[in-house]
Amino acid sequence: MKKHFFILLLIFFSLTDSAFSQAVSRYIYVPISVDGNLTDWDFAEWTWFKPQDSNWKDSASFASFWDENYLYIAFQVLNLNLQAIKTERDEAGLHMDDGVEVLVDPNYDRSSEWQEDDFAYHVNVLNAILDDRGMNEEGKYNNDWDGKAITSVKIFGTVNEPRDIDKGYNVEIAIPWEEIGFLPAHGKKLGMDFCVNDRDDKSGEYRYYDWMKLKRFHMSSGFGTVILTF
Ligand SMILES: [Ca+2]
Ligand SMILES: [Ca+2]
Ligand SMILES: [Ca+2]
Ligand SMILES: [Ca+2]
């Protein structure tokens, strides 16, 4: 009996974790300066997340603000060995570099397929971008779409110098509302996920973790909810 109770409790908490994860994006009167410096985020509400693998000790946090022009996002990522090799926009494999990924479901329909409105930005620690929106004719994520977001990265350490110990990096992103596709207002909701990609320290392969613990990132039905508030 006791065992069943704990199993039910576990199911409940795993459901609440995935189905009801929410973060708040507060209105900000002074526009964020997208420079990698997070002093303008002093009053933000940070959401912390970490890998599911308990042997993997990295972690990250994200926060969001908005104003009439932009949805702002900031990341603080802890990482001891910064590695990235891609420098060109939409370069294949950029998602495997150390960097962050933001996925947005603007119409908040929480679909299981990647649809026209849904878009993703990868920003690696060299501030190179891989962005996509909707699907192309070949049935792949449409990387030909290039968004207008402004991004900036500040690193604490050295990239591609594994002999030292790095601390991590900050990322700031400003996504224009005209790109998201609606006018921002108090109470408005977006589906979003926040992810960290990591070029694995030992094997040179890559691994990742995200806020919503998704197996497939391009799936808005698994996204958390970001609510705009004043
Ligand atoms: Ca800043
Ligand atoms: Ca959608
Ligand atoms: Ca692109
Ligand atoms: Ca280093």
Image: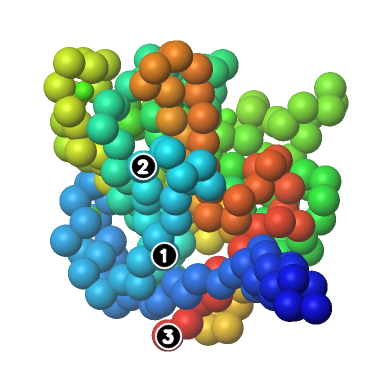
In whole angstroms, how far apart are the C-alphas of marks 1 and 2?
Answer: 17 Å
- Mark 1 or 2, which is nearer the eye? 2
In whole angstroms, how far apart are the C-alphas of marks 3 and 1?
Answer: 18 Å
Residue 218 picture location, percent across and down: 69, 42
Where is mark 3, residue-wise? Answer: 230
Where is mark 2, residue-wise? Answer: 57
In whole angstroms, how far apart are the C-alphas of marks 3 and 2?
Answer: 35 Å
In-front residue for pair 181/119: 119
Mark 2 beta carbon near ligand 4 (under 8 Å) = no
112 on left or right of 120: right
Residue 1, quarter of picture: bottom right
Decide: is 30 above or below 86: below
Q: Secondary structure at mark 1?
A: strand
Query: Which quadrant, please, contains the C terminus?
Result: bottom left
Residue 153 picture location, percent across and down: 28, 39
Identity of the residue furthest to the front in this view? 1
Counting residues from the start of the chain, the first of labels 3 and 1 encountered is 1
Where is mark 1, residue-wise? Answer: 47
